[in-house]
Amino acid sequence: MDIKIKIIRSIDYLSVTDDGSVEFEESKNRLLEIAGVKSPPADFDILLDFRRTQWVLSTEEIFSLASILINDPDSHRDKIALLVLPGVNFNKADFKELCSGSKGVDVQTFTNYEDAIHWFYNE
């Protein structure tokens, strides 16, 4: 099976004001634009890379951004992986609970790039 993965870094779509706060609605629109396909449905999975984000995002804020793709089945094939930094700002269990209502999309979080890529090929 051919695997195509679109990697989207948070610095490519996060919109930040002069005072350093993230503008979530504009960021969501930019994320959808970057993930968008010319003719649906998409033939790729998505890896959202939050590791080099200099802004502190909570688990709920990361879910808010990811959910724009989770709820748009034409923006990806079947899987969405999130790369996050381990630590106090991201809670994997809380994120999994937030994703529990997402039907038909497999969403997983990782702190290691290699593990995320392995998941795309072996699940």
Image (cartoon, rainbow, N blue to C red):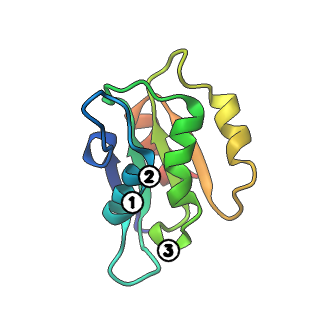
Q: CA distance from mark 3 to mark 1?
A: 15 Å
Instruction: Tell me which label, 2 or 3, sits earlier in the chain.
Output: 2
Check disc 1 and report the residue beneath it. Answer: 29
Tell me if mark 3 has few (under 14), some (14-19) or many (20+) residues whose alpha carbon lies within 10 angstroms of its own: some
Front residue of 94 and 13: 13
Instruction: Tell me which label, 3 or 1, sits earlier in the chain.
Output: 1
Q: Give me the residue at 67% from left, 65% from top.
A: 104
Whole-percent x, y for residue 46 in the image: 43, 56
Check disc 2 and report the residue beneath it. Answer: 25
Whole-percent x, y for residue 69 in the image: 50, 59
Q: Left or right of 72: which side holds 46? A: left
- The amino acid type found where label 2 is placed reads Glu
- Using the image, determine if residue 14 lies above or below residue 112: below
- The amino acid type found where label 1 is placed reads Asn
Q: Secondary structure at mark 2?
A: helix
Furthest toward the front, the residue is 19
Residue 108, by quadrant, is: top right
Q: Secondary structure at mark 1?
A: helix
